[in-house]
Image (cartoon, rainbow, N blue to C red):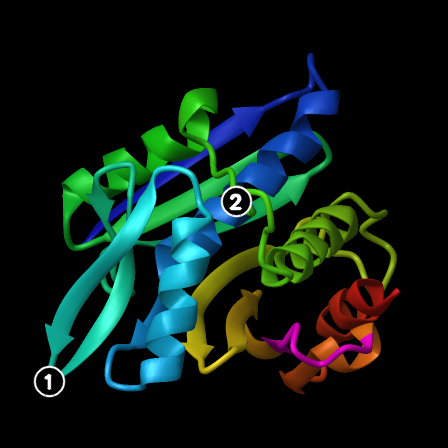
Amino acid sequence: MVVEEVRYDFEDYPKYADDFVRDLLKLMIISKLNSTARNAQSKEYFTKLVSQVEGCETNLVKYGQPLLYVKYRGVEFTDQKVASQFVRNGNVIDVTMESVFGEFVRTFDSLASKSDSRVTWGTGDKPDPMFSLLDSFVEAVGRLSSLDPASPNSLAGKRFGVRNAIMSRKSLHIEFLVNGQLNIIELNPARKKKGKAVELLFGSSEEAKAIAALMKQ
């Protein structure tokens, strides 16, 4: 296992810290995005979403059953290729990356740090409404990561990671970790009311509740 921790220090450019966290979160989600290839509805919706991410295409992987992941800017991701988490303290962000493939650690670091490789999603004339929900997730996590650490809702100083992002029909289940504790949130834009489109399925931490609450505003 190759483990690397990289510190991104924005003390001299504080306004870029928020942008970096947002871009990193998008990359973390894209790197874990997957769907079964056997369910026609899931496969169709997954393919539609991927087509609206710049530099992204579907990647079929056979693990006993066929699964769809993404190939992003030439990098073929699966849930086993690379894991990443970050800790934010003010304008300093420490990112930990680990993989059995050393090349994937270096590639993920490169994608995270280069402005010309950052994730642009929701492209086209009619972006799928799932991207609005994903944006609200990214914004909620970013906002909580910049809160005073004394707040019970704050993610500052806490290790945050995306473990999985599973497409099931027209719902997306994002599994995320806060200091190693698992939480699962469901996004379903087919539910017209925003309060119903976001549901915390698992996790009772104040941070997870705060993320869901911010997304429903």
What residue is at 46 percent from the left and 32 percent from the top? 118
Task: Measuring from the top left, give residue 86's x and y in whole percent.
Answer: 52, 47
Q: Position of residue 153 (x, y in %)?
A: 82, 63
Alpha carbon of mark 2 to alpha carbon of mark 1: how far?
30 Å
Q: Quadrant of residue 4?
A: top left
Q: Nearer the viewer, residue 111 or 187?
A: 187
- The spot of residue 115 in percent (x, y) is 48, 22
Q: Which mark is residue 64?
A: 1
Please report the bounds of the magenta region as a residue range.
Answer: 186-193
What's under tag 1, amino acid-wise? Gly
Tell me where residue 35 appears, x and y as whole percent. 34, 74
Mark 1 secondary-structure assignment:
loop
184 relative to 128, above or below: below
Between 108 and 130, the one lying in front of the other is: 130
Indicate the secondary structure of the residue bearing disc 2: loop
Amino acid beneath label 2: Trp
* Residue identified by numbered label 2: 121
N-term-proximal mark, 2 vs 1:
1
Residue 87 lies left or right of residue 95; in this view the side is right
Give the side of residue 89 with respect to residue 28, left or right.
right
Quadrant of the image containing the C terminus: bottom right
* 191 inside magenta stretch: yes
Residue 84 in sight from this viewpoint: no
